[in-house]
Amino acid sequence: MEQPGSPLSEVRAVVFDTDGVITDSARVHAAAWKEAFDAFLLAHPPTDPGQRRPFDVRDDYLSHVDGKSRLDGAAAFLASRGIETTDATVRAVAADKEERFTRRLREQGVAAYPGTVRLVHALRAAGTPLAAASASRHAGELLTRAGVRDLFDVLVDGAEAARLGLPGKPQPDLFLTAADRLGVPAGRAAVVEDALAGVEAGRRGGFALVVGVDRAATGDSADRLRRHGADIVVRDLAELLGEEPT
Ligand SMILES: O=P(O)(O)OC[C@H]1O[C@@H](O)[C@H](O)[C@@H](O)[C@@H]1O
């Protein structure tokens, strides 16, 4: 990229996570998860009263659900509250979330972050191959609805990951598959992620650069991204074009 001093000018390809990085859909996922988990906690209160508090769209979402597949996220949150689950329970909560998510999506729509779009255009102008990767089965639809699907050479989404049997984040397989399809080794490519499990996947995959996107920008959220593997943390990707954070 022709951006003097930009860390991305050093890499030959970039793999972008989707929810929360390209599209503003992480909030839709988080809100749908909250409704589904809170309904579950009310109907099946954990034995320990200290574990009965409602799902927190910031802390619980970032720590247990963000970036993971639908079933992995449901299982991880329920386990974090000490709830013993069966496959059927996990599937039922995940199905409830899916219904709530699709309803919200129809009602609220989805948009791409303008700062991400500006960065993507700059990278494309420089000829850098770009991929979108996501644990979500809805990723392609979200990118299309936000009008940015055509900006990415490759898409590896949750449906593709399931078809290939790829383990979810924090394992790096989703990102490694995307880099491989761009024809660039991880050691010469960057990963851009907002989820803790996602930056960790980037680090485990040996990517040359892991960019953490700190949408929450509260408390120690930037430090948590760094601790999990981000080399640099920005609030908005336009900062990589030299624009000031807003
Ligand atoms: O249920 P979907 O659309 O396949 O998405 C799975 C997961 O995809 C991830 O990208 C989101 O961070 C999670 O919140 C979401 O649960």
Image: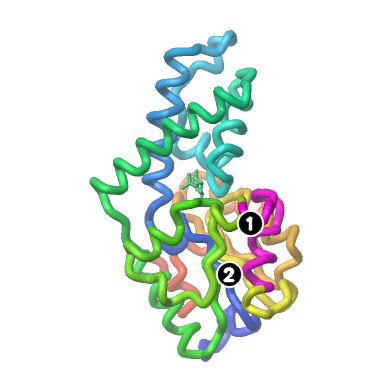
Which numbered tag is attached to residue 199? 1
Q: Residue at x 56, y 49 (%)?
A: 67
| On screen, residue 194 above or below 4 | above
| On screen, residue 36 above or below 154 | above
- Tell me if 190 is positioned left or right of 153 in this view: right
Element carrying mark 1: helix
Return the x and y of residue 234 as percentages of the image width and height: 51, 64
| On screen, residue 211 above or below 66 | below
At label 2, the amino acid type is Val
Q: Work out whether residue 232 or residue 113 is closer to the camera in this orientation and state it.
A: 113
Which numbered tag is attached to residue 15? 2
Q: Residue at x 54, y 10 (%)?
A: 49
Return the x and y of residue 206 as percentages of the image width and height: 76, 66
Q: Work out whether residue 135 or residue 189 is closer to the camera in this orientation and state it.
A: 135
- Tell me if 160 is positioned left or right of 35 in this view: right
Element carrying mark 2: strand
At label 1, the amino acid type is Val
Return the x and y of residue 118 as percentages of the image width and height: 39, 77
Q: Is residue 64 visible?
A: no
For the residues labelled 1 and 2, the Cα–Cα distance comes to 12 Å
Return the x and y of residue 140 as percentages of the image width and height: 44, 61
In the rendered image, the quadrant that contains the N terminus is bottom right
- Tell me if 154 is positioned left or right of 20 in this view: right
Residue lying at the far front in this picture: please name it. Answer: 163
In the rendered image, the quadrant that contains the C terminus is bottom left
Is residue 1 shown in magenta? no
Q: Earlier in the sequence, mark 1 or mark 2?
A: 2
State the image quarter where residue 121 is shown.
Answer: bottom left
Q: Work out whether residue 155 or residue 79 is closer to the camera in this orientation and state it.
A: 155
Question: Magenta residues?
Answer: 163-180
Disc 1 Cβ-to-ligand 1 distance below 8 Å:
no
Q: Residue at x 51, y 44 (%)?
A: 219
